Image: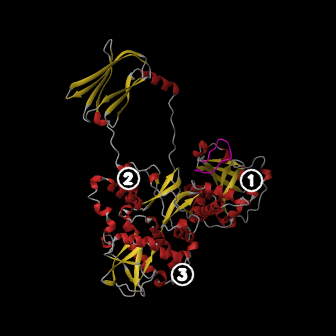
Amino acid sequence: MSDYLFESGETEGTDEFPLKDVSKKSVYYVFLCYFDEKRGHLPLYTYPNNLKFDEEELKIIKIHSIWFLDAGLSDNLQHVDLDYHDRIYLAIKFTGKSWREKTRAGLDKQTPETYVLILSVPKQFSFLGADLLMNLYSKIKEYSDELYILIKKEIASYKVIKSKKDKTLIKEGNLIEEELNKICENLLPNIPEVDQLESLASAEMKKNQKLAYLFLKELSESPESKPRKFEISVDEDRKKEDQEDRAVFVKPIIIKSIKTIDNNNKLELTLKNQSKNLRDIRIQISRVQEFFETSSWETSIDIWLTNEELVFTYPISNEDEKFQVKVENKQDSTKLLSKEIVAKDYIQKVKPFFDTIAMKDFMDKNPVTISSSENIKNAVSIMNENKIDYIILTLDEKPIGIITHRDILKTVLPMMIEHNIKPENIKCKSVMSTPLQSVKKDDNIRKAALIILQTGVKKLPVLEDSKLIGIVRTNDLINIYLNQQLKDPDLEKKYKEIAHLNKYPVERIMNRKVVILDIERADLLDVINVMNERKIGSVLVSTGGERCGKDCGIITERNILKRIIEYGKDPREITLKELMSSPLITIYKDEIIEKAIQTMVNKGIRYLVVMDKDNPEKVEGIISNTDILNLDISKVSPEGLDISQVF
């Protein structure tokens, strides 16, 4: 079979499609269509965009034979072509994932969508078509699992009254259309009108036409062709004969299962007769030590029915014990089964504590989300409103990425300062961290900890059937670990210091490496660079060098995001004095941790500056909510305090 199927449009029924003047037409028409269960073949996206409403072109698209070609056959073809009057329409069919409710019986929500990509070019320039179509297809196929959003957008757009979800779907669909526009603009050579290609039509030889195309071409290489796959099935009659032949060699008695019960004190053995009915059978189970039987148990079975299972239990005195199981015919002593069993091979190991706790048992069941089509300003407002440092990005309510305070400090703010871009003009999708590291609700703590250690992420979304149902933070895992250690009576002495930590001075847990910037000489970019390089969430600012007097203040990630992103302050003009929180809330280094926790809760702050009592302007260190969380909050907090208010 040839590489593509060619179909002539000069057949009956074409008179209903009148010829159009092509002298002012664009060289390329791109149609991305889908099959609607009620309305048939519909355009989802077109390039140029006005083609979506061109009834004459749409009539041609709907009769293209690609729609009626069997999916199996179309997989073996590069493309299917329709030659109609002055243009040729090259098409390829493909499928993509879907989470859209279908209107036809027998189709469920996840039945794949069927898409058709059609490229139309003037007939005299058909040499342009094949390579262009395959390059377009290779790029658009990358979005195949998101294209169903465009279908949902189409449905939402026709609604007179649009819900919040409808408006979100329309925004998400617009973003995908923007990506498709970029693909077409980047891959299609810049020739706006047919007339500009007339000189190429004079090329008589195919070789010259290809050369002319290559002269204009600014495309990536076509994707490598994949080998064709064939599934070979075994003849059913032959398979049945093989099964009958093998039946001769099937063992009459098998051990279906071996396990320990009653806290590993007994061995449970299940034997199955997989042959015909058996009579006069002897079953013997012996305890073996150094090749000698030390004790034996025996029973007789008058009749053992086909497929009947027999269950035996035998006491275990120690895990190194060995047992010999024998099954034989009493009349002629024919052996039907002989098996040695070592007890320790089947003793159920007690799972480590961290393999028994699942994500669903301690995750935060109310993760904060925002559509990927929203802008950074709205994202920061939601983060500040919920007093969190992250937000999960969704596409059609499915998580696709995450944005943290650190992402915004590292990417968004430098962009705003250097290029004068407003946060409401920056899409969340362009800033998010992806691919999203995640866990399932039944995964255990050990798996979550391994992902965190390997990737460095601090938040793990919890998924169920691709839907976001919770989130787990690094500090959640630390707390569970410490709580478990403290419950172990053998480790009480070892962790006594943590258990009574609230009575120790704050200098025991404070961070002594405090960054102090000159309030007159430093600017916002200096603050951002320090935070990003040192991976810290706050800096102090002062006019007195390393000393902090009444004019000293603190700048945190939240200060920056709230004043610049949410309140709209110009990042190039704002001063550190406008950014900082002042006066500082402090604690002396010899005061106890209990007081530090109480101060942070009562004041609603996340950082507490530690000072020297004998030298009130000398900064000794700083305590953050993370410093406290890295210990065991539930063990050190004063009775009755709600520590969650700190975070």
Q: Quadrant of residue 512?
A: bottom left
Q: 144 or 413: nearer the eye?
A: 413
Q: Position of residue 170 (x, y in %)?
A: 65, 61
Residue at the image point whose x is 57% and y is 50% from the top = 97
**Region in magenta:** 96-109
Identify the residue at the far front of this view: 639
Mark 2 touches mark 1? (CB < 8 Å): no
Marks 2 and 3 close (CB-CB < 8 Å): no
The residue carrying mark 3 is 570
Magenta span includes 561: no
Q: In the rendered image, is residue 459 in sight? A: yes
The residue most toward the top is 331
Task: Tell whether position 100 is magenta.
Answer: yes
**Which residue in the protein does label 1 denote?**
59
Is 83 rendered above or below residue 646? above
- Quadrant assignment for the N terminus: top right
**Front-most of residues 334 and 324:** 324
Question: Where in the figure is residue 638, as x and y percent of width and height?
Answer: 39, 66
Of the two numbered discs 1 and 3 in the rendering, the one whose residue sits closer to the viewer? 3
Q: Looking at the image, what colour scheme do you see?
A: secondary structure
- Residue under circle 2? 446
From what the image shows, is residue 257 above or below residue 205?
above
What SS does tag 3 mark? loop
Query: Residue drawn at (51%, 37%), measured in percent from left and top?
Result: 231
Looking at the image, is mark 1 or mark 3 earlier in the sequence?
Answer: 1
Mark 2, mark 1: which one is toward the viewer?
2
The alpha-carbon separation of the residues under discs 2 and 3 comes to: 45 Å
At a point 56% along the width and 68% down the height, the residue shown is 427
Q: Position of residue 388 (x, y in %)?
A: 49, 67
Quarter holding the C terminus? bottom left
Q: Residue 40: where, in percent of width, then height?
A: 71, 49
